Amino acid sequence: MRFLIILLVCASCTPIATYPPIENKTVENYSKNVNEPVITILATAFEYAFEHFGGMDSIVFNLPKGMSATAYARVSEKLNGVLPMTEVGQPAYHVVELRVRGFHADVDMFFPSASGGYEMATIHLEASLIDKWHVTRDRVWLVPVKEIPTPNDPALLVYE
């Protein structure tokens, strides 16, 4: 009985988030405020992409549309001060979509390739009550990336 109660409590506290937000009102409410573990998942995915896919001398990142300036600042802080993308055409790791379901997450990311273009990968991460977030596998897609996202950082928007 105790185990069942603990399981129910843990299951009810697991995060659900999708970026950019595309789902029903319940999931949108979770997605509005970017909290842990989303920041850790993003930072871990960027570090993994940098180490395994390369393509750049340092990490420059772009988050999905709809993420706040605070999210950019927190990811930058988590990555020891790396900078977000600031200019159109600037080489960067682009998170196209992030899906978090409990202790599982998938990050769809565009990354600069050695050939000079971009490629897309899905990075799968997992965690548990005793393990921190870590990458369990990745899949590089053989679909050509033709359109590169522009910077999405709200801090860059100029209101006229």
Image (cartoon, rainbow, N blue to C red):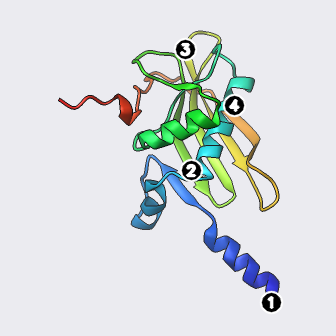
Percent from the top left, x then y, of residue 144? 54, 23
How far is mark 3 from mark 1, CA to CA? Answer: 55 Å
Mark closest to the chain's N terminus, 1 or 4: 1
Q: Say which quarter of the image contains residue 61.
A: top right
Residue 112 to residue 37: above or below: above
Question: Quarter holding the N terminus?
Answer: bottom right
Three-letter amino acid code at the position of disc 3: Gly
Give residue 56's position: percent from left, percent from top. 63, 15
Residue in the image at 43% along x and 55% along y: 32
Alpha carbons under labels 3 and 2: distance apart: 25 Å
Proximity of marks 4 and 3: CB atoms separated by less than 8 Å: no
Q: CA distance from mark 1 to mark 2?
A: 32 Å
Which element is circle 1 on?
loop
**CB contact under 8 Å: marks 3 and 1:** no
The crowd level at tag 1 (other Cα within 10 Å; few <14, some 14-19, many 20+) is few
Residue with the mark numbered 3: 117
Q: Tell me, for residue 47, which label it has, or none.
A: 4
User: Could you say which disc has been placed on residue 99 in the image?
Assistant: 2
Chain-order first, disc 1 or disc 2? 1
**Residue 91 relative to residue 132: left or right:** left
Q: Quadrant of residue 60?
A: top right
User: On the picture, is 126 further left or further right than 110?
Assistant: right
Judging depth in this view, the residue of 4 and 117 nearest the camera is: 4
| Residue 84 percent coordinates (x, y) | 50, 27
Q: Residue at the location (56% across, 60% down)? A: 16
Instruction: Give the mark, 4 or 3, whose residue is nearer the N terminus.
Output: 4
- The amino acid at mark 4 is Glu
Instruction: Kindly indicate the quadrant of the structure image that contains residue 115.
Output: top right
